[in-house]
Amino acid sequence: MANLKEIRARITSISSTMQITSAMKMVSAAKLKKATDAIVMLRPYSEKLQEIIGNVSSTTDLEGISTFTAEREVKKVLYIVVTSNKGLAGAFNSSVIKELNNVVSNAGHEVEILTVGKKVYDAVRRSRTVYDNQSALFDGMNFQVVSNFMERVMESYKEGQFDKVYVIYNKFINAATQEVQTEQVLPLVMAEKEGTLNTDYLFEPNAAEILNVLIPKSIKTQVYKAILDSVASEHGARMTAMHKATDNAQALKNDLVIFYNKARQAAITNEILEIVSGAEALKNS
């Protein structure tokens, strides 16, 4: 039977682990609220921006207006892949990396990767061509930071360095559910509309100039939204993972306490038997 001291040491160790996982769960829960508010506020703006572009483009021929809407032969693709800088979040990072490996293995063309998050950068830096690493943006993330690196991506697209750009990320559903998404960023995909629009629009200065302002903003907003979705998903996944870890540690601690009590009772029983046997031996001597 295990030494009682060893069992006590294991119980103490598990109790310390429970304190850590419980604290991490509470920290993630607090961060999740802030991250959820950010993505909830951005989604309506992003959807309205898409709607405006769709309405303007419905009365305008996009061909020749913007290089960001024209389809071309695909020779090289850039994947913007969003994970986190830290682990302990269940399958949050591994599911995105698995999706990346699947799409790259079936691509049939050259691929480069823009990594957002140390986990995906560490996973691909030795086996794939890394266009850029933006893992540091989480230290002070805002729209301007995303806009800056997307300006370089869009310029590379204009110059023909890439023929398509996709973003792979975890979409936030709720604290316990995240879905891996692969969305096309470039060329811009217009949402399909049901029916036809009968509204006449007046443009100032003109439709082409309006689209040339809105389309780049929409592209940047799409990537920014994907990153905010990923941040909220990370905190939700970590909160869930730490909740499960705390519950598992509690169950293991309970089992060890029962085992410890049984071992202690057995040890006490053995000592009593030894004392009784010794007393009987003295009587008979």
Image (cartoon, grey):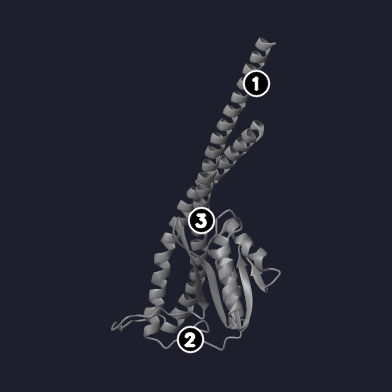
Of 88 and 10, nearer the camera is: 10
Residue 184 visible, this angle: yes
**Does label 1 or label 3 sit earlier along the sequence?**
3
Residue 206 visible, this angle: no
| Mark 2 or 3, closer to the camera | 3
C-alpha span from label 1 to label 3: 55 Å
Disc 3: CA contacts within 10 A as few (<14), some (14-19) or many (>=20): many
Disc 2: CA contacts within 10 A as few (<14), some (14-19) or many (>=20): some
Residue farthest left in this picture = 198
Q: Quadrant of the N terminus?
A: top right
Q: Which residue is mark 1?
A: 274
Q: Quadrant of the C terminus?
A: top right
Residue 197: x and y in percent read 30, 83
* SS under mark 3: helix
Of 13 and 95, nearer the camera is: 13
**Does label 2 or label 1 sit earlier along the sequence?**
2
Q: Amino acid at mark 3?
A: Ala
Q: Which residue is mark 3?
A: 237
* SS under mark 2: loop
Disc 1: CA contacts within 10 A as few (<14), some (14-19) or many (>=20): few
C-alpha span from label 2 to label 1: 96 Å
Of 32 and 139, nearer the camera is: 32
Which residue is depicted at the point 47% across and 62% down? 178
Q: Which residue is mark 2?
A: 65
Q: Against 93, is 32 above or below? A: above
* SS under mark 1: helix
| Mark 2 or 1, closer to the camera | 1
